[in-house]
Image: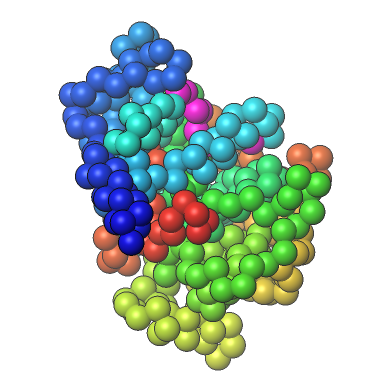
Amino acid sequence: MADNNNNNNNNNAKCEKDRLPLANDVIKGDTGKSYRLIQVLGEGGYGTVFKAIDESSNRTVALKAEKWSKTVLKIELSVLKVTNHHKNAKHFCQLIDHGKQPHEYMFIVMSLLGPDLARLRNDQNERRFTLATAVGMQTLTALFELHQIGFLSRDVKPGNFAIGNRDDELHRLIFMFDFGLSRKYMDKNNNIIPPRKEPGWRGTTRYGSLHAHLKQDLSRRDDLESWFYALVELTKGSLPWRMATDRAKVEELKKYARVDGRKDFLSTCPKCYDQILSLIDGLSFEATPPYVEMQKLLDTYCSENNISMGQKYDWEGEATSSLHTSITTQSVDKSPTDQVRAAAVPGESRPTKHEI
């Protein structure tokens, strides 16, 4: 009993040391560079995202810090290290630096992004985008790129995509961020890792897949299902279950939207959405999703309706230069707006670092 008590005391002592840096603090990364924290961009129970200044270059960056005992930043760091060295992963932040203050916090430093899609959508009068299909093509490409490097998101939603910094030449590119719930789905031999039994809930209720509701292990098909819900929301302005607070009720409404409620669910959406949903629902756990086919469906709709990637988005003041984003076989409401514009602090139901 004495040993157990000592272990508990040690764990409590570590938790008591947990703290996050504050605005105006200067912290040093593993590269030796120092960063002055100048503004809180977003915060949650586990961490804070700051706007910061790289004191060596005067560059404005985003710094995400999480409490030592709760952090899953090692996972996010793993994802960003791979995306930053993969030539076909273009829809991701630049990883600039990282570091830690042992037993207090860990942090990563990234390129600063513009507003996320959840915030931008809520800024629109009807909470929807007129060029939602073009947005969908970019976000689908980002998800494809993530899957290509062997990771799942498990928390795909508008709040985890953001436009580039308006002062940056990539301001029209949509970036995917926040990988706190990510997990590798392939082993070292590039084989699909078999599903685990009862891993628990992962993700955000509004966008979670039906398999997530069943607390089953997730795969690429589930990321795509969450992406599809987000696409419909960006197109219509809301989802049928937006006001439901009970997770079981949300699951019921998602099932209803597949059959009797399908017409209402997809009303005012392009007809190709129905085909895309059928493609996603037909996938097995291990199946490679038909990214190219889905992208072609969206691309055909855009072509038939004279929508080009060079047209201005709803959040832009004026039309800008053309941006092309695609997947090729070679590169194989009224809900609260998410205010975090760099890398958000996840998640609605966050597992420990050992449960990921």
Give how far across and how far down residue 248 sits, in percent.
42, 83
In the shown orientation, is residue 195 left or right of residue 225?
A: right
In the figure, 220 relative to 173: above or below? below
Which residue occupies the foreground of this view, 299 or 147? 147
- Residue 164 magenta: no
In the shown orientation, is residue 349 left or right of residue 134?
A: left
Residue drawn at 35 percent across, 8 percent down = 56
Give how far across and how far down residue 290 sits, in percent.
75, 59
Give how far across and how far down residue 188 sits, in percent.
76, 45
- Residue 92 magenta: yes
Q: Identify the colour scheme used.
A: rainbow
Which residue occupies the foreground of this view, 50 or 27? 27
Residue drawn at 64 percent across, 50 percent down = 184
From which residue to which does the magenta span run? Answer: 89-97
Do we see residue 338 in this rendering? no
Which residue occupies the foreground of this view, 275 or 30? 30
In the shown orientation, is residue 146 left or right of residue 191?
A: left
Q: Quadrant of the N terminus?
A: bottom left
Quadrant of residue 330 in the image? top right
In the shown orientation, is residue 327 left or right of residue 249?
A: right
In the figure, 172 relative to 303: above or below? above
Residue drawn at 68 percent across, 47 percent down = 150
Majority secondary structure of magenta residues: loop
Instruction: Tally the marks.
Output: 0
Q: Residue furthest top?
A: 56
Quadrant of residue 85 in the image? top right
Give how far across and how far down residue 253 sits, in percent.
46, 84
Residue drawn at 29 percent across, 65 percent down = 335
Do we see residue 214 in this rendering? yes
Q: Residue furthest front?
A: 2
